[in-house]
Image: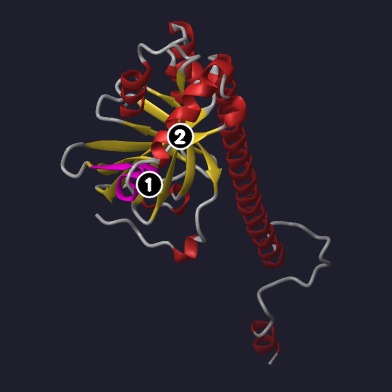
Amino acid sequence: MATSLQNLVPPFSCRRPSDTSPSTPIAIFRGGRRRNARKTLRVCRAMVEKTVQGASSTFAKEMERLSAKESLLLAFKDAGGFEALVTGKTTDVQCIDVNERIISLEKLNPTPRPSTSPNLEGRWNFEWFGAGSPVLLFAKFLFGRIPPTLANLSKLDVLIKDGCGTATAQVKILNSIENKFIISTKYSVEGPLRMKEEYVEGAFESPKVNEEAVPEQLKGAFGQAFNTLQQLPVPIRDAVSSGMKVPLSGTFQRLILISYLDDEILIIRNTAGEPEVLTRLEAGPDPQNITEYES
């Protein structure tokens, strides 16, 4: 009977928990639990470190992007801005400096599919364009041999909405006569970055005259021209007042790549790789109401 009772004794010792002798089953169980706890702690610590490092990396990249944007805008200002670019007053050093900063910002593009992004819509102001850009060619065609005191391209912007673009060039003559040349375009998506731009129509708006800014020596001629206009037949006078439209469908189109887009800056490149940089003037519509462009 005693032997039977001894055989029923559990194969472990009832020592105090403080006894950590590895020969006891309890010690083995407690040691396994500690090993599991240490392993879990290491896993948790690695996850926390990875999360912190990821957040730090994201923050550092965002700060780098914001710094690159500020650097580019300062480079535009140092180069003389839009007027200096149009009149050809920018130096080679200023041009290469701007292009270097454009490349630095393009590397940090936060928009993976800019051709269909809601941020593309809105009104944009041209800040920079290459030598082969239609914008610069148009400006040189109009004002290449005209002194800036007589006529100059004071501003150029474009409104992009619903897959269409409306580029407006504001021209000032004799610092008193303001005129607008408007080009209507159509965009079609050909890839995540690539789009095709087709020119649809050009229009010259009727000039608006600031009489107070007209030079004294020209006020007499201006008055005669105004009286002559009033004596024209009504159909002709209305046509002159409403401006002139020129159909451009099928005459010009180009492929462009959107190399950078956020809520403030848009950078596109033509087939020659020349950049055009635009800054936002007005926000686009609600992203929930935007559909993708025609592809």
Q: Residue furthest left?
A: 250
Is 175 part of what is drawn in magenta? no
Reply above or below: 237 against 156: below
Closest to the observer, 292 or 26: 292
Depth-wise, is mark 2 or mark 1 nearer the camera?
2
Marks 2 and 1, Cα distance to the nearest angstrom? 15 Å
Badge 1: residue crowd in 10 Å (few <14, some 14–19, many ≥20): some
Q: Quarter holding the N terminus?
A: bottom right
Closest to the observer, 269 or 30: 269
Q: In the shown orientation, is residue 267 left or right of residue 63?
A: left
- Residue 247 in sight from this viewpoint: yes
Measuring from the top left, give residue 292's x and y in whole percent. Answer: 35, 59
Measuring from the top left, give residue 194's x and y in whole percent. Answer: 29, 42
Q: Which residue is mark 1?
A: 242
Question: Could you say which quadrant of the image residue 290 lies in?
Answer: bottom left
Q: Which residue is mark 2?
A: 226
